[in-house]
Amino acid sequence: MARAFAKVILFGEHAVVHGRTAVAAALDRGAAAEARRTSGRSRLELKAWGKVVQDDDRDDDVSRAFAAVLHEVGGEGAVDVSVDVQVPGGAGLGCSAAIAVSLARAVAEARGVDLDDERAAACANAWERVFHGNPSGIDAAVAAGCGAGGAARGGVIAFKRGEPVRPIVPGGVMELCVGYTGEPSSTKAMVEAVARQLARRPEVVERTFDGIDALAAKSIAAIEAGRWYEVGQLMDLNHALLASLMVSTEALERACHLARGAGALGAKLTGGGGGGCAVALAPGKVDEVLAAWKAAGIDGFVTRLGAPPGGVR
Ligand code: MEV
């Protein structure tokens, strides 16, 4: 079984597409794939989506993305792959990249190709390009556990396009709640919307990206030192800048507001926005945040970064 992890972006989404730094963490859930050699055409089953494709349907995005991964992995031979996911798609949690990394690893295993974490991420980016047009690569890097030796659970990284991934070690257990607004969103559409704003008002939008970059840079030292109050404030500021890029929604504003009201130190949208998920930093208050969300119909879960595997839960 080949595995990969979903992710939560703590700082820097959208700005990271345009060369700024982002900070992200792997969740303890993601995707798992199994592949076996077969004769005839390669075939992919995405169980959660009830979708089965071959690698030769030019009119189908999943088929084209599958073909791109098969090509990028290299080696030879048709494969029959099935992939299962444990996170919702279109929620900003890196479901697509997790599928792609687990798929690439399973294909490599079946073909006897050696694939390190960086190559697995590169293969996943070939998949991501079909769906997202211009992915920064952060989702694939986290999904593959780059900078964390493949042991992605709870791994936190700083990511900048074209630079090596930098692992971040939190100075204590970082207690986060992730809440799904129930509004599915398209990362591609949101990335394109931000690119249109950049083309229209480059001086304003570049400065917004620079602001987000400064917050991400500051957050690294604060996370490493376990200064959660500061991290929370930086998250609120990052959310405000994302909202100024028009990628927040009423439901995301509400999720962040409820989390802060329930005792979170900070909250922001995570991922592409336009729906999807909010993330809240809530040391000692995770139950209160989840309860406030639940009362408002928002499904949430807790993730603890920097906790030893099988440790605090
Ligand atoms: C999506 O998870 C994060 C974005 O920054 C897009 C990307 O980095 O490719 C919105």
Image: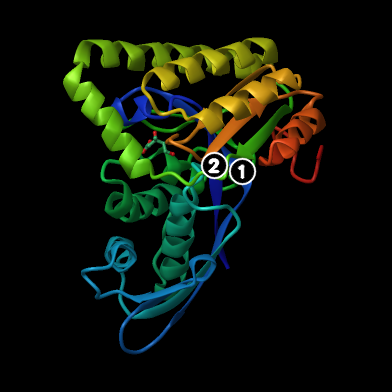
Q: Residue at x 30, y 76 (%)?
A: 76
Q: In the displayed orientation, state which residue is furthest to the bottom.
A: 39
Tell me which numbered mark, 2 or 1, is placed earlier along the sequence.
Answer: 2
Closer to the camera in the image, 9 or 37:
9
Rendering coords of residue 163 (x, y %): 35, 30
Q: Residue at x 49, y 60 (%)?
A: 102
Name the residue that disc number 2 marks: 7
Q: Amino acid at mark 2?
A: Lys
Q: CA distance from mark 2 to mark 1?
A: 5 Å
Q: Is residue 32 visible?
A: yes
Cβ at disc 2 under 8 Å from ligand 1? yes
Q: In the displayed orientation, state which residue is furthest to the left.
A: 199
Rendering coords of residue 160 (x, y %): 37, 28
User: Is 101 situated left or right of 268 in this image?
Assistant: left
Q: Secondary structure at mark 1?
A: strand
Rendering coords of residue 227 (x, y %): 68, 12
Q: Is residue 287 above or below residue 62?
A: above
